[in-house]
Image (tube, rainbow, N blue to C red):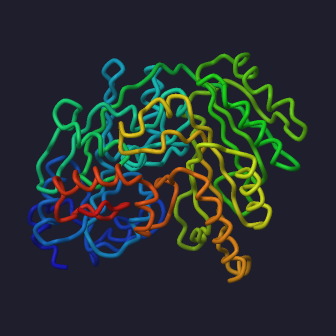
Amino acid sequence: MNVEGLRSALPSAVVAPGDDGWDAARLFHSGIGEPDAVVRARSVADVQAAVRWASAVGAPVMVRGGGHSAWGSVPGGLTIDLSALADVAVDGSLVSVGGGATWGAVAHELAAHGLGVSSGDTASVGVGGLTLGGGIGWMVRAWGLASDQLESAQLVTAAGEVVEATDASHPDLLWALRGGGGNVGVVTRFDFRAHALPSVVFATLGVSGDARPVLRAMRDALSDAPRDLTVTFMDVPPMDPSAPEGATITACWIGPDEIAARAALLPLLALEGVTEIDLGVRAYPDILLDAPDFDPAQPMPGFVGGNALIADLGDDAIDRLVAFREAHPASVLFLRSLGGAYGDAAQDSTAFAARDATWFAMAGAFDIPGMLDDDERAAAVAEWDAIEPLGVGVYGNFTTSIDPDWVPRMYPPATLSRLTGIKRAWDPENLFSRNHNICP
């Protein structure tokens, strides 16, 4: 594709194949892209010029913040890199965040003000992608999703116009931004309502033996636990670089009260096979993970499995999830508690539905050559296909799949219909299609 017109509009921001710095420009956190060009936007005006060019030539747009999305690997099109738009401004409890900021940087800035916003678990994840996809974080039971804390947003539309989306000015647009993905524009600024957060109590518990009774006890304990507590269960093989080998429960309690946190965790600490590894007060930024950057010499393997937002984590669901992990040595099992403030939002109040879910679960086998043959791969697919219907939806932020089949599984029919109408109004040519795409 000829990008000379784009160079004329943005002479110092465009990088294309053959240019010095091309390999660095197309490298993102999860891989190496092959777009027709990358625009390193330094201002909202840069984003406008890039969008107008893409619209004129019919180039699909991929927006990059933290760079964890699988969409960066789709060849062709225009990548708009927002990483330079990363300012954080605090005005009381209102926090304005540039569209290219990462959660680790935001958490550090907010910690200096004694504030926090419930974000993801990983410091390098982009504010934009996580929020637009919903955003399940460590304070989800107390404060809801990251998108639930979104007060307003500034975005560049498919027409290249700048719009301020609020509940008063553009309620449908803001509704879609709260969980509907990047389908309606390039968000250049997010405005969040932050919460007081002096520190957290963070605990790590080791789990040995049969995980089933532990997960049942964890489910029962969280059914009426204080909203200040959110827990995660993870069981990973030794080849997963993101976490230590084995099964653990990690827990986050809002605030510095170790006694209250320990009391809330007592039903788990009393279980056979559960041991306390660590429990203490931490600064919130310090509990965010540092995910390794993409290594071309050791690309991440494929993932055979999926995730589900589960309303009733019954014994059958627990048995199936644990059996999946046991059946595949190179597999991962992950559960995160929901409920509380997450469930306070009405099902149709945002584009992120499934508000009756009380747990998020993910399981998958790593598709490593020599460890997963065709029969085992087919078995893993069949096992997950039997688990997913136990949920009430799936979470788009926790997949590397770019299969369009994910969209109707993410959004119930009424939500998808409303999103389609909003997409048709704001992006009728589907310029913003490199995402879990709502077709206009």
Q: Seen from this angle, which residue lies furthest front?
A: 414
In this view, 95 is above or below 390: above
In terms of image quadrants, where is residue 102? top left
What residue is shown at x 64% (from left), y 54% (from top)? 242
What residue is shown at x 12% (from left), y 54% (from top)? 160
Q: Position of residue 183 (x, y in %)?
A: 28, 55
Whether residue 212 is visible to the viewer of this picture, yes or no, is: yes
For the N terminus, give its image quadrant: bottom left
Q: Position of residue 215 (x, y in %)?
A: 76, 43
In terms of image quadrants, where is residue 206? top right
In this view, 126 is above or below 79: above
- In the image, 235 versus 201, the foreground residue is 235
In this view, 244 is above or below 139: below
Residue 179 lies left or right of residue 76; in this view the side is: right
What residue is shown at x 78% (from left), y 60% (from top)? 323
Q: Position of residue 426 (x, y in %)?
A: 17, 53
